[in-house]
Image: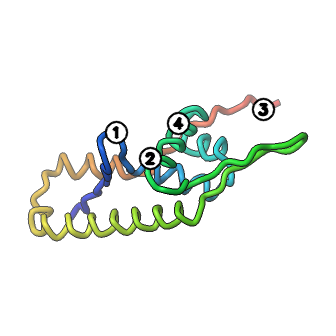
Amino acid sequence: MPRPVVRLRIDFAPGRALGPGKIGLLAAIGQTGSLSAAAAELGMSYKRAWVLLQSVNELFDAPLAVMSKGGRGGGGGATVTDRGLEVIAAFRTAEHKSTLATARAFGRLLATVSPTTRGAVVRRLRPRTTRRSRKPRA
């Protein structure tokens, strides 16, 4: 039986939303300590990541991540704040509870999902693999 996957987006006001992309960016910043590394990990441009970070920092009364400037010979970095960690945890909790609620709401109907749909869900949930070009051996 397929398990539904819920993609949660919370709209706080028109044009002021929090979803999996922004939360993923915050989590990647927390793991890498760098906005550029987080952007690369997520396959997005630095500019796109910077715009997303600016918009997520405007959602609450305190920033969710802060940037530090690099000095001579050393790069800057990015850090997820305590508020940012709270927001990530709250979003993950809401996401998990939403998925459970959806599974309960659809209950026995999940067994009736068409085989075509089941195949599409399985394909979509498989991790993406990247092709690496092989260099000719010398």
Q: In this view, does 105 lie above or below 129?
A: below
Residue picked out by circle 4: 51
Q: Do the residues labelled 2 and 3 touch (CB within 8 Å)?
A: no
In front of the other: 93 or 82: 82
Instruction: Give the SS element for disc 3.
Output: loop
Q: Which of marks 1 and 2 is in front?
A: 1
Q: Which residue is drawn at 34% across and 63% down?
A: 95
Whichever of callouts 3 and 4 sits on the residue coming sooner in the sequence is 4
Q: How far apart are marks 1 and 3 (CA)?
A: 52 Å
Instruction: Give the SS element for disc 1.
Output: loop
User: Which percent across, then down, holds residue 92?
Assistant: 41, 64
Amino acid found under the numbered disc labelled 2: Gly
Amino acid found under the numbered disc labelled 1: Gly
Residue picked out by circle 3: 137
Amino acid found under the numbered disc labelled 4: Val
Whichever of callouts 2 and 4 sits on the residue coming sooner in the sequence is 2
> 10 Å neighbourhood of mark 4: few (<14), some, or many (≥20)?
few
Q: Distance between the residues labelled 3 and 4?
A: 42 Å
> What label sits on residue 21 in the rendered view?
2
Instruction: Give the SS element for disc 4.
Output: helix
Q: Distance between the residues labelled 2 and 3?
A: 39 Å
Please state, as top left, top right, bottom left or bottom right, where the N terminus lies in the image.
bottom left
> What label sits on residue 100 in the rendered view?
none
In front of the other: 59 or 9: 59
Q: Nearer the viewer, mark 1 or mark 3?
A: 1
Whichever of callouts 1 and 3 sits on the residue coming sooner in the sequence is 1
